[in-house]
Amino acid sequence: MSSPSSPFRPLRRLSTLGAALALLTGTASACESSEPSAAVRSASASTAPGAAAVPQVATRFEQETPTEAAQRMAEAAQEVAESRQNAIVRAAERVAPAVVTVSTIRTTTVQRGFGFFSFGPQQRRAGGFGSGFVIDGDEGIILTNEHVIRGAERIQVTLSDGTDLEAELVGADEVTDVAVLRVDAERTLPEAPLGTSEALITGEWAVALGNPFGVSVTNAEPTVTTGVVSATGRHLVPNEQDESFYLGMIQTDAAINPGNSGGPLVNVLGQVIGVNSSIFSRSGGSDGLGFAIPIDRALRVADDLVTTGEIRRAWLGLQVDAAESDDWGRARGVMITEVFGDSPAREAEIRPGRMIHEANGRRMTGPLDWEDVILDLREGDPLELVVEGRDDPVVLITAPYPSTQAMRVQVVDDLDVITVTPQIRAERDLAIDRGALVVGITDELRRVTGLREEDVILAIRSRSFERRIETADDLAAAFRAFDDAGARVRFQLVFARGNQQRQTTLTYNARGARGDGADG
């Protein structure tokens, strides 16, 4: 029985482009038959060795000879071939070998239920995908996004040649959304050429590389999309899905889809100018609004993480706010609202209530501009301010954060706290002006107590006593009293998280604390 006829038939003729290239190159390799076409035979007959010359009728009109025509066609074919190797193609070829796929495994908790019935929480292991690129081939150092590896229990990197390698997390910074991985490849890996994000031109070409939607699982070569630098210095405020601010971002219309995060944004020279990080989308895919972290900022963070394992940000000792806002909530101007004692701002005799017009040569249009500037400062860096009421610019020498200089008190083996001071309150933007700030806690103690870093412990309550916690030493003294008693003690730990006050019930003896459940 014959099959029904189909409107689609096998292609038995050269496509328009194929025919053109066949004629231009003087071959018919794209044809189904290996025989040269009539056009090619006629064009090449005069030059074939031993072939009889094709007579050309002489006329009064100027006419191209077959030899000239064949030469012209060969030159045109060469031009077509060269035109395909444009700047974007060369840029992609230069960077692609250094682009990697980042695969993660994390455990998530989901609520099981059906209709009105709830079966309780259930843990589920889930895979995730992102991108990254090699910045140090000798050491196997890879740059990616913090949100790509957040909460990951296992991280695997797939190189562009398909090699899978287990990756170690060197460090991550949630503020800038930058993370650094290390792999042991037992060979030198291809490195991405690193450019600069300074002096970018709005409208210049931009090339995004990465692994959209995890498609590189089956093909390790990165996907390439193109566009332009749409804008620089963009600030993104949090939405329902994302609680983070993104400051000073590069905006591009090169397609950045889920999975591209962590891949490089490249200029036409094949140099990395940014780290693809986020998109603004109504559909979940690319709507032409992609954003990348400037490479200069990402490399400063990476250098801190590789060198010291932490970010060495600077402290100024002042707080600012918008001078005013319009009916749409847009902030205008930057006003100093508070200056703290024993700080660089106090030493420079800066006063509250004054406007900051410029910071390091950048005009301050709103508080996010201010945050963007100080995000890149490190201890000892100078900051030049143009302040209202001062004839000359004011230069501050930044200091380390007070919390890094504060004395850490170890309450129990798995819990470190520091005393909340006015300086630390300003640094961490705390709503509480006293207590013991949690700065170190193990995963196990976090699980059993419900505490986490940035919580401020305010009091300990039991049936027989209540102790108000003013300092880190107060909390340590309370736990020493439990040890001296030598008995199991059940008590409530009262703490602040943001603007909310909470408490959790614990049972403690000399071996440590056990959580009985958070009371809210």
Image (cartoon, grey):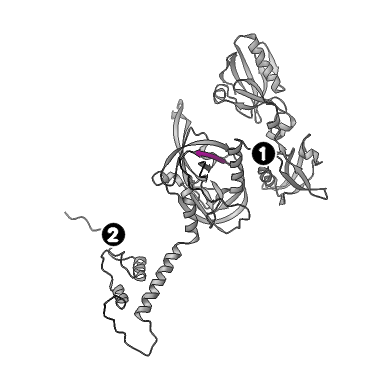
Q: The C terminus appears in which quarter of the rendering?
A: top right
**CA distance for labels 2 and 1:** 64 Å
For mark 1, give the secondary structure: loop
Image coordinates for residue 77, horizontal then vertical, percent: 40, 69
On the picture, is 146 further left or further right than 322? left
Q: The N terminus appears in which quarter of the rendering?
A: bottom left
Range shown magenta: 173-182
Image coordinates for residue 364, horizontal then vertical, percent: 71, 49
Visible residue check, residue 241? no
**Sequence order check: which comes first, mark 2 or mark 1?**
2
Q: Is residue 337 above or below residue 486?
A: below
Q: Nearer the viewer, residue 339 or 22?
A: 22
Amino acid type at image mark 1: Arg
On the picture, is 346 further left or further right than 499? right
Image coordinates for residue 350, horizontal then vertical, percent: 80, 42
**Which residue is at the far bottom?**
60
Q: Which residue is mark 1?
A: 313
Amino acid type at image mark 2: Phe
Q: Alpha-carbon neighbours of circle 2 within 10 Å: few (<14), some, or many (≥20)?
A: few
Q: Which mark is residue 276?
A: none
Q: In which quarter of the view is residue 57 placed?
A: bottom left
Q: Which residue is mark 2?
A: 8
Q: Is residue 440 above or below residue 24?
A: above
Q: Is residue 306 magenta?
A: no
